[in-house]
């Protein structure tokens, strides 16, 4: 039996038929024309201390964190994307869900991204984040959130903690880690003038700082191991 179409169905069908000519026909094998990118999200780089349009530097202690991404065999992973996000010097996130969001440091970038080189290396310039109250009876220690991803590997989300901070051992998230694994996410930061001079120069060069690292800054190394997809 031949189906009878309603007036609405018939009109819809006629639109589909004429729509190609009205809106432009699509031909098999033709390539969609390229257009300019946009809008752009500003400041998605590895220097969180410089914000486009900002007139001041962010408040807080400047730090550099560097390291390398490896696979489980110890081979460096090139072109891995390393992302970090953290609070400012007052313990505020750049997130609308943070009740203190209007008080955030507008001169701080909050989020950074870096792609590893052929040796698996990455680096960030940022500030030391502040502790903050996660709840009435829970004070989170200073930490930096990390996400690492690369095709052929499992995504890794983790956190970097600062060695010697008394809040580490009281933190529920940190304490969930087996003791044998805590050292791998706990980083000792040293004054910039106390690290190897060649390393200091390499980090400074990466940020275009001809005068080297500032003496009042601190440097920490955080190496990361990720799992290959089975």
Image (tube, rainbow, N blue to C red):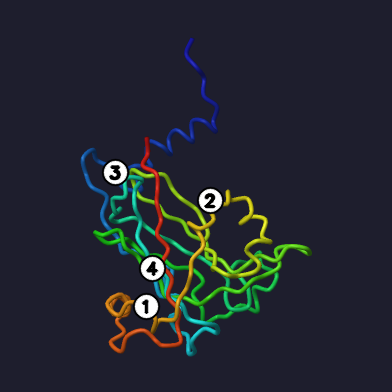
Q: Nearer the viewer, mark 2 or mark 3?
A: 2
What residue sits 35% from the left and 56% below the top?
A: 69
Query: Element type at marker 2?
Result: helix
In the displayed structure image, the side of residue 35 where residue 61 appears, left or right: right
Distance from Cα at disc 4 to Cα at disc 2? 22 Å
Q: Nearer the viewer, mark 4 or mark 2?
A: 2
- Tell me, for residue 66, which label it has, or none: 4
- In the rendered structure, are the residues bearing label 4 and label 2 in contact, judged by CB atoms less than 8 Å apart? no
Distance from Cα at disc 3 to Cα at disc 4? 52 Å
The quadrant holding residue 105 is bottom right
Distance from Cα at disc 2 to Cα at disc 1? 26 Å
On the image, the x and y values in percent for residue 127 come to 50, 77
The quadrant holding residue 198 is bottom left
Provide the residue designation for mark 1.
195
Query: Element type at marker 1?
Result: loop
Residue furthest left as drawn: 29
In this rendered view, identify the residue nearer to me: 2 or 41. Answer: 41
On the image, the x and y values in percent for residue 94 come to 58, 70
Q: Nearer the viewer, mark 4 or mark 1?
A: 1
Query: Element type at marker 4?
Result: strand
- In the rendered structure, are the residues bearing label 3 and label 1 in contact, judged by CB atoms less than 8 Å apart? no
What residue sits 49% from the left and 89% below the top?
A: 56
In this rendered view, identify the residue nearer to me: 88 or 62. Answer: 62
Q: Residues within 10 Å of mark 1 (few under 14, many from 20)?
A: some
- Tell me, for residue 47, which label it has, or none: none
What residue sits 32% from the left and 76% below the top?
A: 203
Provide the residue designation for mark 2.
180
Point out the tag, 4 or 1, that comes first from the N-terminus. 4
Distance from Cα at disc 4 to Cα at disc 1? 12 Å
Residue 188 to residue 17: above or below? below
Residue 30 to residue 76: above or below? above
């Amino acid at each position: 039996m031949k189906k009878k179409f309603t007036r609405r169905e018939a009109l819809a069908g006629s639109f589909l038929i004429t729509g190609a000519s009205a809106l432009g026909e699509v031909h098999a094998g033709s390539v969609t024309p390229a257009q300019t990118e946009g809008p752009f999200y500003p400041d998605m780089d590895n220097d969180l201390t410089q914000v486009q349009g900002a007139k001041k530097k962010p408040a807080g202690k400047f730090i550099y964190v560097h390291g390398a991404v490896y696979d489980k065999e110890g081979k460096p992973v090139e072109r891995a994307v390393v992302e970090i996000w953290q609070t400012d010097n007052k313990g505020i996130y750049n997130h609308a869900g943070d009740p203190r969001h209007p008080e955030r440091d507008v001169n701080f970038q909050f989020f950074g991204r870096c792609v590893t080189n052929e040796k698996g290396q990455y680096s960030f310039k940022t500030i030391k984040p502040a502790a903050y109250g996660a709840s009435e009876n829970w004070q989170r220690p200073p930490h930096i959130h990390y996400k690492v991803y690369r095709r052929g590997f499992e995504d890794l989300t983790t956190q970097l903690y600062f060695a010697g901070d008394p809040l580490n051992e009281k933190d529920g998230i940190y304490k969930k880690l087996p003791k044998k694994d805590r050292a791998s996410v706990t980083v000792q930061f040293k004054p910039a003038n106390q690290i190897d001079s060649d390393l200091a120069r390499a980090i400074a060069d990466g940020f275009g700082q001809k005068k080297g690292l500032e003496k009042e800054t601190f440097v920490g190394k955080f190496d990361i191991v990720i799992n290959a997809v089975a």
